[in-house]
Image (cartoon, helix red, strand yellow):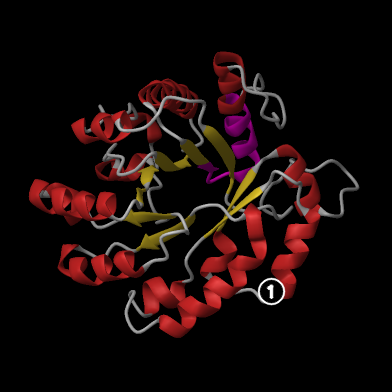
């Protein structure tokens, strides 16, 4: 089964847990100002975003970047792209657009963060060609990467370039079921100013730690193609508004759907609420009033 996918969404709890007490403490150290907000999808291919592109659109990235201000670039998981490709993406995207590349599986899954210096260097060289359009890099470890790998993870994080934002997603429940392990993990991430990815998918509510480790959040939201998706997006708006009041500096929010044609509507709903509630002027793709179900 696809990660986090559930067959009967109505049978699963979907409300957001309360924030961990450390989240307010972390954000309290920041100056209060309007945070940067980046909202997007995991990919821009027409085959994935069914119904999103107007008829006749040939340059998918150019159009996508005129509608969204960010992309969670999962394509990097499968390969490290040559500079010429990255330069082409840079040139074809809107001036204020940001790319959020995923650490390649060669590093995260096959090498498990060890003996990967050459691959990491190739990755850094590649993404450097995004220049000022390079956003936070995100690292995703699979279910079998648990607390017994703490030292390897800590070494990798400590050696990560301090001028390159990183967010870490951990899927093994052991990182969160033991409070001592969770405390050690978050202390290490906080010490190195690394974000703690929040994965919101109905089938894995154990990953909803709601514990920020720096002044930004990296949220990966997966819809269930159910009416509860609307409620969940609205709850996220409320939570992000609370974090805004507490001092968050940057919000990175990426919407996934098992039926990709619906994800732009969920994104539009969140963007519309932010524009209306915060006085922002983010582009709104599609119509946030269209019912998904």
Residue 31 position (above or below residue 217): above
User: In the rendered image, which residue does mark 1 sit on?
Assistant: 83
Residue at 73% over, 59% down: 90
User: For the residue carrying disc 1, how many other residues have a C-alpha within 10 Å: few (<14), some (14-19), or many (20+)?
Assistant: some
Residue 188 visible in image: yes
**In the image shown, does 49 or 199 lie closer to the viewer?**
199
Residue 130 position (above or below residue 232): below
- Is 2 displayed left or right of 131 in the figure? left
Residue 188 position (above or below residue 179): below
Instruction: Give the extent of the magenta segment.
Output: 254-269
Task: List x then y, in percent, for residue 167.
Answer: 40, 53
**In the image shown, does 41 or 21 lie closer to the viewer?**
21
Determine the main secondary structure of the stretch shown in magenta.
helix
Q: Is 201 included in the stretch rendered in magenta?
A: no
Q: Is 261 included in the stretch rendered in magenta?
A: yes
Residue 79 visible in image: no
């Amino acid at each position: 089964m696809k990660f986090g996918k559930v067959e009967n969404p109505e049978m699963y709890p979907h409300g957001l847990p309360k924030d961990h007490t450390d989240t307010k403490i972390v954000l309290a150290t920041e100056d209060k100002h309007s945070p940067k907000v980046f909202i997007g999808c995991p990919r821009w291919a027409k085959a994935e975003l069914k119904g999103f592109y107007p008829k006749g659109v040939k340059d998918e990235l150019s159009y996508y970047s005129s509608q969204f201000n960010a992309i969670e670039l999962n394509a990097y998981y499968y390969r490290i792209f040559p500079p010429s490709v990255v330069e082409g993406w840079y040139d074809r995207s809107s001036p204020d657009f940001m790319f959020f590349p995923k650490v390649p599986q060669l590093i995260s899954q096959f090498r498990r963060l060890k003996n990967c210096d050459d691959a990491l260097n190739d990755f850094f060289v590649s993404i450097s060609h995004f220049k000022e359009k390079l956003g936070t890099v995100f690292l995703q470890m699979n279910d079998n990467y648990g607390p017994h790998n703490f030292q390897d993870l800590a070494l990798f994080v400590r050696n990560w370039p301090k001028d390159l934002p990183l967010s870490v997603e951990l899927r093994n429940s052991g990182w969160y079921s033991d409070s001592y392990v969770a405390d050690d993990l978050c202390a290490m991430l906080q010490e190195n100013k690394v974000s703690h990815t929040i994965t919101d998918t109905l089938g894995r509510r154990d990953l909803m730690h709601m514990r920020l480790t720096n002044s930004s959040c990296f949220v990966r939201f997966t819809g269930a193609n159910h009416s509860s998706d609307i409620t969940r997006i609205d709850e996220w708006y409320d939570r992000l508004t609370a974090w805004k009041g507490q001092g968050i500096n940057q919000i990175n929010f990426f919407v996934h759907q098992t039926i990709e044609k619906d994800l732009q509507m969920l994104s539009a709903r969140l963007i519309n609420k932010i524009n209306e509630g915060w006085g922002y002027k983010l582009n709104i793709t599609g119509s946030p009033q269209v019912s998904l179900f």
